Amino acid sequence: MKVLEAAPERYDRGIRLLSRGSIDAVYERIAQRVASPGSKVLDIGCGTGGVSLACARSGAEVTGIDISPLAIEVSKARGVKDTRVMSITRVSRKMGIYDTILMMGNNFGLFSNKKRARWMLRRFDSMTPADSRIIAQSLDPHQTDDQDHIAYHATNISMGRMAGQVRIRVRYKTYITPWFDYLMVSSQEMAEILHGTGWQILEILGSGGANYLAVIGKVKV
Ligand SMILES: C[S@@+](CC[C@H](N)C(=O)[O-])C[C@H]1O[C@@H](n2cnc3c(N)ncnc32)[C@H](O)[C@@H]1O
């Protein structure tokens, strides 16, 4: 991955190769589903802007945010019009009202933990209309036979954390990020996190593997 991450255009090409070209089709399918002329889309952790651009091509007004200034520079250069260097934790109603919030590329993980997820989901509720959608991608950590992973899950649970909550930091040469938590959940765990926040899972899209997309909408009152 180091080789891919050294340059953004290499990253895009690499991800396309690793996904055997399917990533562009996924972006297009998401765009067809949520983007229409005049609709407003917030792409959280937009990376190099692939899904933002697909939504913009379908006529949506897209805001792409990412904590990485380089990712935002690339998104901007590729044509995403409204881009901001900012963390998910700074997302609020002050940004405006959005019809769709995207958390693609396993970005449900950016919630870090259950408490922060519930806090953020309530915030998302305040900045979206009744028929809005969150499209969030996650990875079911329980779909593994790896004994090291299973032991890690057990340690997490004994510490009151979710099984798929990983604490990581990224090192490249002398560059080291601070430690941060990244959350992976099964669709059932996701439903438990959503419970009581005003949101519910409407549909799970996936091929039956560990990786899946959840279409999340508001609970009707
Ligand atoms: C796996 S990439 C996904 C990129 C894009 N959504 C996609 O599907 O191709 C995760 C992105 O989230 C960004 N990110 C990491 N932590 C973040 C945070 N706290 N707030 C916003 N973005 C963050 C990273 O910089 C990276 O661009």
Image: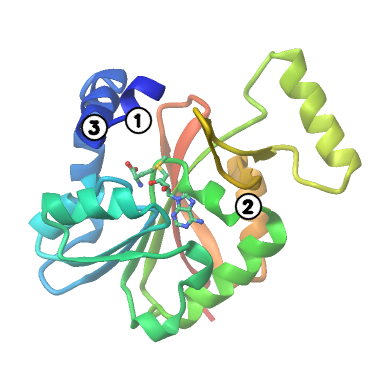
What amino acid is found at the position of numbered circle 1 in the picture? Glu
Query: Residue placed at 31% from the left, 66% from the top?
Result: 84
| Left/right of residue 69 with respect to residue 204 in the rendered view | left
Where on the picture, by quarter, is residue 183?
top right
Where on the picture, by quarter, is residue 3?
top left
Q: Sequence-wise, which precedes: disc 2 or disc 3?
A: 3
| Left/right of residue 21 with respect to residue 161 in the rendered view | left
The colour scheme used here is rainbow
Marks counted in the figure total: 3
- The x and y percentages for residue 85 are 36, 63
Query: Residue placed at 65% from the left, 47% from the top?
Result: 181
Q: Are marks 2 and 3 in contact (CB under 8 Å)?
A: no
What amino acid is found at the position of numbered circle 3 in the picture? Asp
- The x and y percentages for residue 82 are 21, 68
Q: Of discs 2 and 1, which sits in the foreground? A: 1
Q: Are marks 1 and 3 in contact (CB under 8 Å)?
A: no
Residue 90 seen by the camera: yes
Task: Tell me, for residue 5, which label it has, or none.
Answer: 1
| Left/right of residue 137 with respect to residue 9 in the rendered view | right
Q: Of discs 1 and 3, which sits in the foreground? A: 1
Callout 3: helix, strand or loop?
helix
Residue of label 3: 12
Query: Residue placed at 66% from the left, 57% from the top?
Result: 193
Residue 198 seen by the camera: no
The quarter of the rendered structure image containing the N terminus is top left
Mark pair 1, 3: CA separation: 9 Å
- The x and y percentages for residue 220 are 50, 76
Q: Residues within 10 Å of mark 1 (few under 14, many from 20)?
A: few
Residue of label 2: 112
Q: Sequence-wise, which precedes: disc 1 or disc 3?
A: 1
Task: Tell me, for residue 190, which label it has, or none.
Answer: none
